[in-house]
Amino acid sequence: MRTSTDAGADTALRYRAFAEVEARGLSACYEAWAAGVALDAATIGLIDRLPPTKRQPNLVFSAARFHGAEAGGYLGFRAWLAANWAVVEQTCRSHATQTNEPGRCAVLLPALGSLPGPLALIEVGASAGLCLLPDLYSYRYRPGGRSADGPGDGAALLDPPAGTSPVLLECAVTGSVPVPSRLPRVVWRAGIDLNPLDVTDPADVAWLEALIWPEHDDRRARLRASVQVARTAPPRLVRGDLNEQVEALVAEAPPDATVVVFHTAVLAYLDEAGRDRFVATMARLRAERGVRWLANEGRTVVPGVAGTLPSTLPAASGSADFVLSLDGRAVALAQPHGRAVHWLG
Ligand SMILES: C[S@@+](CC[C@H](N)C(=O)[O-])C[C@H]1O[C@@H](n2cnc3c(N)ncnc32)[C@H](O)[C@@H]1O
């Protein structure tokens, strides 16, 4: 039988690993908070009142910041958390980590641009749907390793037909990235999520902001700008499980458009059976309906994709965490927030 002491040890290990593996180099604040929690039995005692799936550092820290915890050192956070635990606990129980990162559109766009248009987009695991708007953002693809210092740096710029978007997605590129000459025409779009967030609801937007790590000010600014863009025409989002809903949405899409089902940072939430079922559905929809399938996920997350990667990969491309695949075949490596992409082959 497991004891509460075992649970505390598990939580300590989980927070230490988060500090050393996930936060280091990306957030000094979260590294300090997680390392501090790992050594602090009293705070672990609070966190262990939550069900195991709700004890994730990312969820607890986001909930704390949602309620006003200031970025800073561990001792200040410890005292704040002890004083505000009741509301943090409630938010951890009612919310989930569902970061919506529109920067990932910079990774999707070259693949979308290679497909015959017009496009009908279906995003599974859409959160608030900010990745459903790739045709409403501006892009700047900069050859990797060069500074973004304006004309002459070899960057490719793309704007929507109506003019420059308030959302500029910057992406460093290596390999022969097929940057399209213009943005694809999207004639229909819809998303699916277990818990769709609403860009017109200030509480949902505040939660999306809290999910962005403290030091990532550029991502926060981008989120705010893309929420403003999305509010002009909020994307349609269906509540439900992607495996249950995707075929009905495909059936609704206009028949004269190329239907693209896509997802980014989603399949890791599914168990093995759920992932296998989704992959089988995509293969069938491709064969029966010509549906295209674009996935931007961790390297080993989508069944079958890792086996299509070349045997030698760039050593330090800065873009090696996610794999972009089209119809089950790897086409690019991508930095998880879309800051960099390396095209394969
Ligand atoms: C990390 S977020 C990514 C959101 C968005 N794709 C992006 O990249 O910005 C993952 C989303 O997938 C959703 N999700 C997880 N499992 C799901 C499922 N079985 N069916 C539908 N949505 C799911 C979550 O609710 C969450 O909003």
Image (spheres, rainbow, N blue to C red):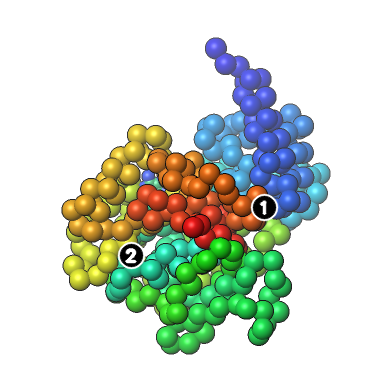
Query: Are the residues at dot 2 and dot 1 in contact (C-beta closer than 8 Å)?
Result: no
Left or right of 47 in this view: 275: left
Nearer the N terminus, badge 2 or badge 1?
2
- The answer, for residue 210, to whether it is visible in the render is no
Please give the name of the residue rendered at 30% of the width and 71% of the height, measured from the top-left corner.
Answer: 116
Determine whether the residue tagged by mark 2 lies in a helix, strand or loop. strand
The picture quadrant where one finds residue 197 is bottom left
> Is 151 on the left-hand or right-hand side of 187?
right
Amino acid type, callout 1: Ala
Rendered view: 343 above or below 49: below
Ligand 1 within 8 Å, label 2 CB: no
Query: Which residue lies at the image location 28% right of the left edge and 52% below the top edge?
Result: 246
Badge 1: residue crowd in 10 Å (few <14, some 14–19, many ≥20) = few
Cα–Cα span, label 2 and label 1 = 32 Å
From the image, tell me which residue sits under label 1: 316
Quadrant in which residue 18 is drawn: top right
Question: Is disc 1 placed on a helix, strand or loop?
Answer: loop
Does 343 sit above or below residue 312? below
Q: Amino acid at mark 2?
A: Leu
Per the image, the residue denoted by label 2 is: 121
> Residue 301 location in percent, x, y?
46, 42
Instruction: Provide residue 254's location: percent of width, then percent of height.
Output: 21, 68
Q: Residue at x 62, y 24 (%)?
A: 7
Residue 97 in picture, x, y percent from top left: 52, 48
x, y percent for residue 313: 58, 49
Quarter of the image with the N terminus is top right
Please say if 63 is above or below 179. above
Closer to the eye: label 2 or 1:
1
State the count of labels: 2
Q: Nearer the viewer, residue 261 or 91?
A: 261
Residue 95 disc label? none
Q: Pick out the residue farthest to the top.
A: 1
